[in-house]
Amino acid sequence: MPCKENDMANPMVMSNFQQSQAASWTVAPGEARPLEIGPGSRWLRVTEGRLWLTVPGTADEPAQDVWLESGDSIALPAGAQAVLEAWPSAQFQLLVPPDACQRGKSLAQRLSEQLASRLGASSPALHAA
């Protein structure tokens, strides 16, 4: 189930540079656009207009309709599917959550530690990170 940014305990925090560098997509009046989220979670952020987001239901949960206005964001989990419609038109961005980089860094640190333990920590290059 997606949740609006305002409902989250840890809201999305992005610098102005990150926000200005993100690609935007436009949804024209009367257009319905399918949206599939890949292997990582994403934030959908409306930058202009209003979006009608429909998340299909499952056997356990009914379908959801969410209205998002300019400035609203919603978390979409990995593998999520949705349909977007503009009212009357809208622009949006798909953003990588800031903690995605932290998860990658901790994975790199764990791999480095495992490699160091297997090699007996004899390589000075392993300690430079």
Image: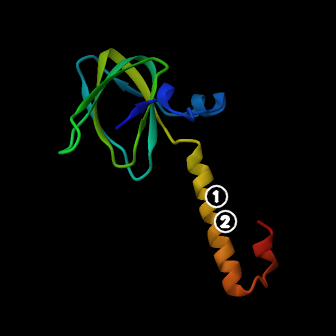
Q: Secondary structure at mark 1?
A: helix
Q: Which mark is residue 105?
A: 1
Q: Which residue is mark 2?
A: 109
Residue 32: x and y in percent read 24, 27
Disc 1 and disc 2 in contact, CB within 8 angstroms: yes
Crowd class of label 2 (few under 14; some 14 to 19; many from 20; radius 10 Å): few
Disc 1 residue type (three-letter)? Lys
Residue 27: x and y in percent read 33, 24
Relative height, residue 10 to residue 28 (above, below) = below
Q: Residue at x 56, y 32 (%)?
A: 11
- Residue 97 located left or right of residue 48: right
Q: In which quarter of the view is residue 53 placed?
A: top left
- The number of callouts visible is 2
Residue reaching furthest top?
88
Relative height, residue 99 to residue 74 (above, below) = below
Crowd class of label 1 (few under 14; some 14 to 19; many from 20; radius 10 Å): few
Residue 119: x and y in percent read 70, 86
Residue 45: x and y in percent read 46, 28
Relative height, residue 70 to residue 121 (above, below) = above
Q: Residue at x 69, y 82 (%)?
A: 117
Task: For marks 1 and 2, give the CA distance.
Answer: 6 Å
Which quarter of the figure is the N terminus placed in?
top left
Disc 2 residue type (three-letter)? Gln
Q: Which mark is residue 20?
A: none
Q: Residue at x 59, y 63 (%)?
A: 107
